[in-house]
C-alpha cells in the first residue's frame, strides 16, 4: 500500500454503516467474526462459541463486545486505533444481555429491527434475538453490500497486490504443471507458491486436467496429467490485509490443441475480452454477463457456458456484485469483480479465463496481467 491511498479501515466506515442502517430503517446491526466485522472495524477474529460482536445502533456510538481474554487482541488490531468502546465480558457473564443493555441505553428503547451478518453463526444470531425480545431479525447484507461493493483506493491497491502475486504463481506453471504428475502433486506445489508469493493463506487450488476441466469447481485428484491435456488452473489466496486473489488460466501441456479446441478457445478468449471491455460506469452487471454470453452463444457454444460471468471480490473471494443475468445494478467506479467465462465439454475437457477487474471513472483496470491465450507448456 502506498502512503497516499490512506488507511484501509477508518471510524468513518463504521459511521457510514450506521447512516445506511438508519436510512433503511434498521435499529441495530450486529456483526460477528468474519469479513463484515473485519471490513468495518479492522478486527480479524476467529469465530467461536464465545460472543465477539460489533454492535452498530441507529443512534449513539458503535461498540465492540469481546471476551475479556481477547480484549488485548482488539487493542493490537487496527480496531484498537478507531476509538471504539470495548465492552469486555468475563467467562460467567451473559454477553448477549450485556450487548442488549448497551444498545437499549443508546437508543432509549429496545430495537425493533435488528440485522445480523449473513454468515453470523445461528447460535449468535438467535442469542441476540433472545436478549432483545420483541425484535425481528433480518440480514445486514443490504447495508454491508452497499458499502463493501465500492472499494476505496487503498482496497484497490490491495487487490492489485493480490493480483500481481497470483500472476507470479501462474508464471511459474511451466515448472509445476508437467506430464506425469498428479493434479494433487501440482496443487501442493501451487499452494506452496501461493504462500511464497506473498499470501498468508491459500483459498483454493483447482487443477482440472483433461475431463476434470469440464467440472468448473473440481479441485484436485489423483489423475495423472497426460501429454496434450487441457488443464484449467484456478487459484487464489489471501494477503495479510485479508484481500483476495482469484485467477484462472488454461494450459495445454506437452502437446498442441486440436483444431476444434483452438477454435472454441478463441471464442472464449474473445468473450472474456469483450466482457472486460464492456466494464465502465453505468453498464449494469447483467450487461457484462450478456456480452460474454452473446459471443459464446453466437459461435454455437452457449449451452457449454454453464455459470455466471463473475463475482465481486474483496475480503471474501465471492461477494457482491454478482455478474449474472437479473442483476441490473449499474457499475460505479471502485467495484471490483471477476470476469471468468468458461466452456465445458462434459467427459472431455474445459477452459476458463478469469481476471479480476476494477471499474474506473472512465473504464476498467485489470489487476491480472498474464497471457489469456491457451498457454502451451512443454510438459
Ligand atoms: Zn472467481
Ligand atoms: Zn477463480
Image (cartoon, rainbow, N blue to C red):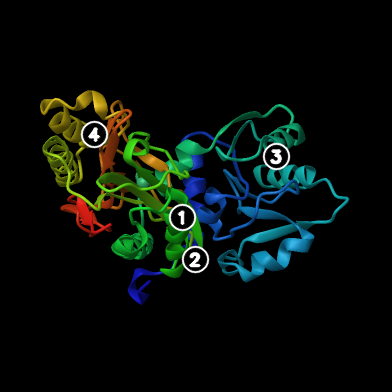
* Residue that numbered label 1 is attached to: 185
Q: Secondary structure at mark 2?
A: loop
Mark number for residue 289? 4
Decide if residue 239 is on the left or right side of residue 65.
left
Spot occupied by residue 216 in the image (x, y as percentages of width and height): 37, 36
Q: Are marks 4 and 3 in contact (CB under 8 Å)?
A: no
Q: Are marks 3 and 1 in contact (CB under 8 Å)?
A: no
- The answer for how far apart the CA atoms under marks 4 and 3 are is 37 Å
Residue 228: tell me if it is visible. yes
Q: Nearer the viewer, mark 2 or mark 1?
A: 1
> Which quadrant of the figure contains the N terminus?
bottom left
Badge 4 or badge 1: first in the primary sequence: 1
* Residue that numbered label 2 is attached to: 240
Spot occupied by residue 30 in the image (x, y as percentages of width and height): 62, 43
Q: Residue furthest bottom?
A: 3
Decide if residue 323 is on the left or right side of residue 217.
left
Spot occupied by residue 268 in the image (x, y as percentages of width and height): 18, 39
Decide if residue 272 is on the left or right side of residue 218.
left
Badge 4 or badge 3: first in the primary sequence: 3
Amino acid at each position: 500500500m502506498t502512503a497516499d491511498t490512506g488507511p484501509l479501515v477508518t471510524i468513518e466506515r463504521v459511521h457510514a454503516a450506521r447512516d445506511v442502517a438508519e436510512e433503511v430503517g434498521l435499529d441495530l446491526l450486529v456483526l460477528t467474526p468474519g469479513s463484515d466485522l473485519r471490513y468495518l472495524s479492522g478486527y480479524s477474529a476467529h469465530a467461536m462459541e464465545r460472543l465477539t460482536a460489533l454492535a452498530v445502533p441507529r443512534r449513539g456510538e458503535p461498540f465492540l463486545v469481546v471476551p475479556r481474554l481477547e480484549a488485548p487482541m482488539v487493542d493490537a488490531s487496527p480496531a484498537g486505533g478507531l476509538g471504539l468502546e470495548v465492552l469486555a465480558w468475563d467467562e460467567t457473564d451473559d454477553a448477549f444481555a450485556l450487548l442488549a443493555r448497551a444498545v437499549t441505553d443508546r437508543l432509549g428503547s429496545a430495537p425493533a429491527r435488528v440485522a445480523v451478518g449473513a454468515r453470523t453463526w445461528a447460535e449468535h444470531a438467535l442469542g441476540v434475538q433472545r436478549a432483545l425480545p420483541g425484535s425481528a431479525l433480518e440480514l445486514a447484507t443490504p447495508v454491508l453490500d452497499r458499502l463493501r461493493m465500492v472499494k476505496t483506493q487503498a482496497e484497490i491497491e490491495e487487490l492489485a497486490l493480490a493480483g500481481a502475486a497470483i500472476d507470479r504463481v501462474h508464471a511459474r506453471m511451466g515448472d509445476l504443471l508437467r506430464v506425469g504428475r498428479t493434479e494433487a502433486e501440482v496443487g501442493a506445489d501451487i499452494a506452496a507458491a501461493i504462500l511464497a508469493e506473498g499470501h498468508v493463506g491459500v483459498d483454493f487450488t483447482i487443477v482440472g486436467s483433461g475431463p476434470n476441466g469440464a467440472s468448473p469447481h473440481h479441485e484436485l485428484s489423483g489423475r495423472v496429467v497426460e501429454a496434450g491435456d487441457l488443464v484449467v488452473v484456478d487459484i487464489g489466496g489471501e494477503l495479510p490485509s485479508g484481500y483476495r486473489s482469484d485467477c484462472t488460466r488454461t494450459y495445454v501441456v506437452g502437446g498442441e490443441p486440436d483444431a476444434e479446441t483452438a477454435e472454441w478457445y478463441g471464442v472464449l478468449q474473445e468473450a472474456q475480452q469483450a466482457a472486460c471491455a464492456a466494464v465502465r460506469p453505468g453498464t449494469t452487471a447483467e450487461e457484462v454477463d450478456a456480452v460474454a454470453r452473446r459471443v459464446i452463444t453466437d459461435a454455437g457454444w452457449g449451452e457449454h457456458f454453464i455459470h455466471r460471468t463473475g463475482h465481486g471480490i474483496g475480503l471474501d473471494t465471492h461477494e457482491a456484485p454478482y455478474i449474472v443475468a437479473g442483476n441490473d445494478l449499474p457499475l460505479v467506479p471502485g467495484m471490483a469483480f471477476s470476469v471468468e467465462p468458461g466452456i465445458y465439454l462434459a467427459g472431455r475437457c474445459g477452459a476458463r479465463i478469469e481476471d479480476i477487474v476494477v471499474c474506473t471513472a472512465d473504464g476498467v483496470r485489470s489487476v491480472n496481467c498474464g497471457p489469456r491465450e491457451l498457454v502451451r507448456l512443454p510438459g
